[in-house]
Every structure is written in C-alpha cells, then in structure tokens.
Amino acid sequence: MKKLVTRNSAEHIQPLYEVLRNAGVPVSVTEEQGRFHLWLIQPAFEAHAKALLAAYEENPQAFAAVQPQSQAVWAPLWRSLAKQAGIFTFLVTLAVLATALWQLLDPQHALSAMIIAHPSMPSLNAAEPWRLVSPAFLHFSATHLIFNLFWWWYLAGRVELFLGRGVLIALFLFTAIASNLAQYLVSGPLFGGLSGVVYGLFGFAMIMSAKRGGPLYLPPALLVFMIGWLVLGYTEVLWVDMANEAHFVGLLSGIVAGAFVRFGLRK
C-alpha cells in the first residue's frame, strides 16, 4: 500500500476518502497517535488518486453534488471491482463460479465433463480440445475457489486494463494449457484449479514490471508469498494436495510469455 495523505482529524480525512471511494479507487484509512492516514491499496491507481485529490483540494464544492449517494453496500463495491478488471476477467470469473455451482449440483457429471481426459479414455482425445483448458475452471473446496479467484482478479484485471483483452486471452490459454498438460503428465487427469494460470500471470507480471510503481508492479511481500507457497507445495508441511507441477510450469510459461511480450514485441 502507498500513503496518500495524512490529516489531524477524522473530519478532514473523511471527505478525501469518500471522493476516492466514489470514484472506484481502492483506499483505506488508519489512525496512529491521533493522526489519520489515507492509504492507496493498489499502486496502479496512484496517478488517478492524486489527480482526484488535487481537484478536490482546488474546488471541494465541485464534489459536493456527488457525495450524497446511496449507502447500499453492494453498489460501491461493484463500482470498485468493475474499475479493476475488463470483460474477459469478468467472463472467466463467472465461468469459474458457474462451474462451482455445477459441481455442487451434479459433481459426477461436472467432473467427467471438465477434467483433461475423459474417465473412459486412457489418454487425451484430440476431438475434445477444450479439455486442455477446462480443468482450470474446476475447484474442490471453497478455500481453493476463493483463493484462486482473488488472485485471478488482482492479476488478470491489471493485465487486461493496461495491456488489453487480447494479451490476457492469449496468456490465459497459453498458461492454462501448459500447466494442465504438465500436471496431467505427472499425476493423471484428476486435478483442477485456476492456480496454474494465476502463477502464469504472476510470472508474466514479474517480467513485465519495468519499474517500481508501474501498473504490473508486484510488491516484494507478494513475491515472497507466491514463491514461498510454491516451494511449500513440494514439502510435506502443508496438509492439502497441491497441483505443484501446474504451479511450477504455469510460472515458467508466464515468465516466457512476459519475456516474449516485453523483449520480442517491443512495439
């Protein structure tokens, strides 16, 4: 997070917070020794946030008309989320949630339709090419689902907004196919999850981050967490089965894609 402003009272920090929240900028407020700090949650919004704050300081009355808004919980949340992602990020999220509902209502048919190889066939079927991607939509617990969707939204949204839908679609297909094939070759067809793609996006953003504060910049704490989680998957410390090969190959495929886009497609 990045500190934007500090004020001596809640009354002075509150209108600044509301201006940014109403514009869909993700911010939070903390209090320390009687001083209130306004924090920007995602660095990608820094330029927009500073422009809004400068405009407010210059003419607070211009924002007075937009302050009295509905206090409904979901409307501000939806506006905030909508500004952090594009249409393909939305569609994949909806597809994952729809698949989760299908798994809940009819788990046997959902699993047989979505895993990489049909249970009745010992190998991949060239007549069903979608199975190379479809395991990414499967999840086997609420924790698994929420964890992957959070990181998908955080990373995919940035890629789509700043590099375009085409780049994200290509990256999704490339990392999903690479990670699913790797996991299948090692453990067979019974696996699923978006985490191979998430690690692909992570590797891609890691290469594409040209400088601190850029739109795809990843904080050092996030780098440590993601790499640490990958390494822990290969140990016996964790009590859950993890698709380690999908994570590792997803990361490598994202790094390759990032290097290709950044250095091979300079234009």
Image (cartoon, grey):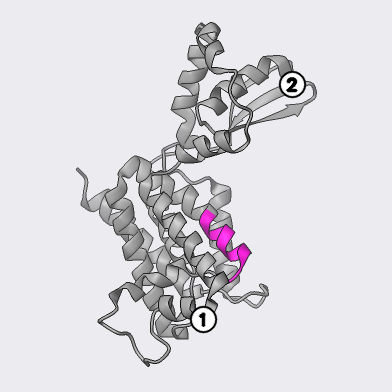
Q: Residues within 10 Å of mark 1 (few under 14, many from 20)?
A: few
Quadrant of residue 74 in the image? top right
Q: For mark 2, give the secondary structure.
A: strand
Amino acid type at circle 2 is Arg
Q: CA distance from mark 1 to mark 2?
A: 56 Å
Q: Which residues are magenta?
A: 140-149
Q: Nearer the viewer, residue 163 or 61?
A: 61
Amino acid type at circle 1 is Gln
Between marks 1 and 2 in the image, the one whose residue lies nearer the viewer: 1
Give the vertical position of 203 relative to 179 (above or below): above
Give the vertical position of 75 relative to 66 (above or below): below
Which residue is label 1 attached to?
108
| Residue under the image location 38 percent in, 54 percent down | 204
Number of numbered callouts drawn: 2
Disc number for residue 35: 2
**Which residue in the rendered view is the most extreme toward the front?**
105
Find residue 73 and report its horizontal and vertical position in percent.
Answer: 63, 36
| Residue under the image location 45 percent in, 86 percent down | 188
| Residue under the image location 66 percent in, 20 percent down | 14
Residue 208 magenta: no
Dominant secondary structure, magenta: helix
Q: Quadrant of the C terminus?
A: top left
Residue 142 magenta: yes
Q: Residues within 10 Å of mark 2 (few under 14, many from 20)?
A: few
Find residue 121 and report its horizontal and vertical position in percent.
Answer: 37, 91
Q: For mark 1, give the secondary structure.
A: helix
Q: Is residue 208 visible?
A: no
Find residue 197 and report its horizontal and vertical position in percent.
Answer: 42, 62
Side of 39 where 85 appears, left or right: left
